[in-house]
Amino acid sequence: LARDPDVILVDALMPELDGFEVIRRVRARGSTAKAIVMSGGEPVEISEEALAVRADAYLAKLAIYDLIAGVIDKLAQPEETALPAASRDRLAPARRR
């Protein structure tokens, strides 16, 4: 990437390079971009892997599109996270603002 993005939205399971590896590589460059992992897979397994790569939010693909747009808008703000304070120890689906 030519510059550091504000937000990264990845699918957990993509061909050739999965979303987790994308986040690992971006983080390895020192990026502070907010990372959102989307998946239609098993939420517990996906959220554990998302935590391991320091993702900021996890969204099930069944989430409504305006919720996704709201999460992206919120994460684009400085020092914001889409995680409820009580769920910081476990990655949980993002809530509406």
Image: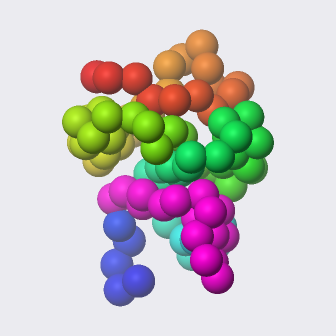
Q: Residue at x 44, y 37 (%)?
A: 62
74 vs 79, nearest the viewer = 74
Q: Residue at x 61, y 20 (%)?
A: 87
In the rendered view, would you say 42 is above or below 55?
above
Residue 58 percent location from the top left of the image: 54, 40
Residue 68 percent location from the top left of the image: 32, 41
In this picture, residue 17 sits left or right of residue 66:
right
The N terminus lies in quadrant: bottom left
| Total number of numbered discs in the rendering | 0
Q: Quadrant of residue 85?
A: top right
Q: Quadrant of residue 20?
A: bottom right
Q: Is residue 29 visible?
A: yes
Residue 41 percent location from the top left of the image: 65, 46
Q: Residue at x 70, y 40 (%)?
A: 42
Q: Quadrant of residue 5?
A: bottom left
The C terminus lies in quadrant: top left
In this picture, residue 89 sits left or right of residue 37:
right
In the rendered view, would you say 35 is above or below 24?
above
Magenta stretch: residue 20 in it? Answer: yes
Q: Is residue 56 visible?
A: no
Magenta stretch: residue 37 in it? Answer: no
Residue furthest bottom as drawn: 2
In the rendered view, would you say 4 is above or below 34?
below
Check the image and tell me how it is coloured.
rainbow
Residues in magenta, as a range = 6-21
In this picture, residue 47 sits left or right of residue 6:
right
15 vs 95, nearest the viewer = 15
